[in-house]
Image (spheres, helix red, strand yellow):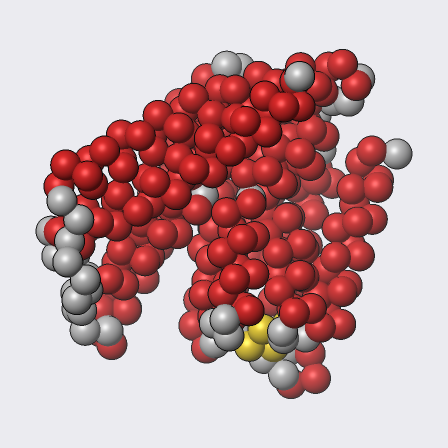
């Protein structure tokens, strides 16, 4: 029964994220916000909303393992599984902005997470934790990144507005309210039963967060990225994953740690190091054989690394 309710909670999260994203996009359209800004903020953050809800609720409930493990696991799932699967379907060409901006920013964000989460290793404290100051720094950096991206995009992208008729305002508000309700209710349900299952199986909450919770909350990115690649729009898949990974660290952990300082608990230095490794490997793929592409063989390596890491966690 716990598994059934876990899946029900996950379904509510995914449906809520979809409704909230659609409602927010329609609201932006009604007030004539440029489409590239909508894509940068609403869509990118919208697909990370499940992780945001689960991590914030975990932080409020004092379950730091799940809050941090959710982000760590989601970032690993995004690179090793989603990009791995997408590259197997079709090699992913990296754009100049991916190589010069998105991937380096993601790598810097992962290094920042490692520094903030390694108090004992760096002799900055006796307990590894991401405190409120760290959370505020992350949020400020994320806002700065959004400002920089919008400013640079604004130089070359004209403001275009959708030709589609705007949804009725009342329907837009219904989408937003119902989406939020689904996210909060589903998040509570999912979190509670994930914890129950972990305790019954004798598995640590951190491992459940890195595997089950992270994989579940990353389903929006997986679905949208695979569909994008199948339709020949690899750039959307890459943008979705890269933007989500940056938002997961700087926005989600930033908000969570600002609300409630996060102790690392069962999340080890190795787990956080894997996030840095995933960002580094993604950067290196841009320069293998002078092809700015994530090739099929590289996608296969990504999947193999993830499988080996999960085996190490559960053995």
Q: Residue at x 67, y 34 (%)?
A: 212
Q: Nearer the viewer, residue 32 or 305?
A: 32
* 255 left or right of 249 in image: left
The answer to whether residue 16 is above or below residue 79 is above
Q: Residue at x 26, y 43 (%)?
A: 23
Residue 44 vs residue 96, the one in the foreground: 44
Q: Is residue 247 visible?
A: no
Q: How many marks?
A: 0
**Can you say which quadrant of the picture contains the C terminus?**
top right
In this view, 137 is above or below 91 = above
Residue 229, x across and y down, in percent: 54, 68
Say whether residue 248 is left or right of residue 64.
left
Q: Is residue 257 left or right of residue 113?
A: left
Quarter of the image with the N terminus in it: top right
| 81 versus 97 height, above or below | above
> Could you say where residue 194 lies in the image, as x and y percent from the top left?
63, 22
Among all residues in the image, which is located at the extreme bottom? 290
Residue under the point 46% across and 17% down: 60
- Lateral position of residue 246 relative to residue 87, left or right: left
Q: Where in the figure is residue 114, as x and y percent of width and height? A: 60, 42
Task: Give the percent coordinates (x, y) of residue 127.
Answer: 63, 22
Question: In the image shown, does 3 or 212 lie closer to the viewer?
Answer: 3
State the residue at coordinates (64%, 48%).
76
Residue 184 visible (yes or no): yes
Quarter of the view holding residue 267: top right
Res 311 → quadrant: top right
């Amino acid at each position: 029964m716990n598994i059934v309710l876990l899946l029900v909670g996950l379904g509510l999260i995914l449906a809520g994220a979809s409704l909230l994203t659609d409602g927010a996009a329609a609201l932006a359209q009604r007030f004539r916000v440029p489409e590239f800004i909508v894509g940068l903020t609403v869509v990118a953050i919208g697909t990370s909303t499940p992780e945001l809800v689960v991590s914030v609720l975990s932080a409020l409930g004092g379950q730091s393992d799940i809050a941090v493990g959710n982000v760590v696991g989601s970032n690993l799932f995004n690179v090793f599984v989603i990009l791995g699967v997408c590259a197997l379907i079709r090699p992913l060409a990296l754009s100049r902005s991916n190589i010069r901006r998105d991937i380096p920013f993601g790598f810097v964000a992962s290094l920042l997470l490692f520094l903030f989460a390694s108090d004992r290793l760096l002799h900055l404290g006796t307990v590894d934790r991401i405190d409120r100051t760290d959370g505020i720094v992350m949020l400020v950096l994320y806002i700065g990144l959004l400002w920089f991206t919008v400013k640079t995009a604004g130089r070359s992208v004209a403001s275009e507005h959708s030709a589609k008729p705007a949804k009725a305002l009342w329907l837009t508000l219904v989408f937003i309210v119902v989406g939020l309700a689904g996210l909060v209710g589903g998040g509570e349900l999912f979190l509670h039963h994930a914890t129950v299952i972990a305790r019954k199986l004798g598995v640590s909450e951190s491992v459940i967060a890195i595997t089950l919770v992270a994989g579940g909350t990353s389903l929006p990115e997986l679905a949208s990225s695979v569909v994008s690649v199948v339709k020949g729009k690899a750039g959307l898949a890459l943008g979705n994953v890269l933007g989500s990974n940056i938002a997961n660290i700087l926005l989600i952990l930033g908000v969570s740690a600002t609300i409630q300082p996060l102790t690392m608990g069962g999340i080890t230095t190795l787990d956080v190091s894997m996030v840095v490794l995933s960002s580094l490997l993604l950067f290196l793929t841009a320069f293998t054989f002078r092809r700015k592409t994530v090739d099929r063989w590289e996608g296969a390596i990504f999947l193999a690394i993830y499988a080996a890491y999960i085996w190490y966690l559960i053995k």
